Amino acid sequence: MGVSVTERIGGGCLCGDIRYAISGDAQLQLFCFCAACRRRSGTDGYAGYMVKDEVFSVLQGTASVYERSSEVGRTVQLHFCGRCGSNLWGATELGLTSVAAGSLDDPELFQPDRAVFLHEAPTWARVPEGMA
Ligand SMILES: [Zn+2]
Ligand SMILES: [Zn+2]
């Protein structure tokens, strides 16, 4: 699974203030349908393109940060553009940066193979076939 990365992957927010680069393969690619992701995204859930912290770098701009404690007591820092509101990435304590797949310049790089927190998904969630 996954695309082998031979050159840097780019991404950023809608208004263009914030740009990032990824220089390594995704470790996990998933949909999360938890209530927090639903609320944050404004739709059924979240598409996470998760990479090791060390391959993720901010090229331009300063993201706004909202820090929250998860249900299991971990702290996650949610980064978003304070100007245009785009969700960009989440930094966890697990050594992985969860990049919002929709912020990738090439959204086709996202090849999810699992969905989590399905029990919190609204009935109208668009769960891909085979992941329900
Ligand atoms: Zn922006
Ligand atoms: Zn979630």
Image (cartoon, rainbow, N blue to C red):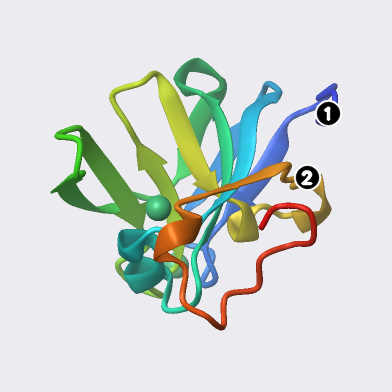
Instruction: Let me know if residue 98 appears in the view.
Output: yes
User: Can residue 33 be seen in this snapshot?
Assistant: no
Judging depth in this view, the residue of 11 and 126 nearest the camera is 126
Q: Quadrant of residue 97?
A: top left
Depth check: give the residue in front, 38 or 115. Answer: 115
In the rendering, which numbered label is found on residue 119? none
Q: Amino acid at mark 2?
A: Gln
Name the residue: 81% across, 26% down.
Answer: 7
Residue 26 higher or lower than 98, as above or below: above
Q: Earlier in the sequence, mark 1 or mark 2?
A: 1
Q: x%, y% of residue 82? A: 30, 67
- Asked if residue 82 lies left or right of residue 107, the reply is left
Mark 1 nearby-residue class (10 Å; few <14, some 14–19, many ≥20)? few
**Quarter of the figure with the N terminus:** top right
Q: Secondary structure at mark 1?
A: loop
Which residue in the protein does label 2 denote? 111
Q: Could you tell me residue 91's position as x and y percent? A: 34, 35
Q: Which mark is residue 1?
A: 1
Question: How far across and how far down the image is residue 76, in percent?
Answer: 25, 40
> What residue is rendered at 62% in x and 60% in y?
102
CB of mark 1 within 8 Å of CB of mark 2? yes
Viewport quadrant of the C terminus: bottom right
Q: Secondary structure at mark 2?
A: loop
Q: The residue under label 1 is which amino acid type? A: Met
Q: Is residue 117 left or right of residue 65?
A: right
Across and down, in percent, residue 123 comes to 52, 80
| Residue closest to the eye, 132 or 96 | 132
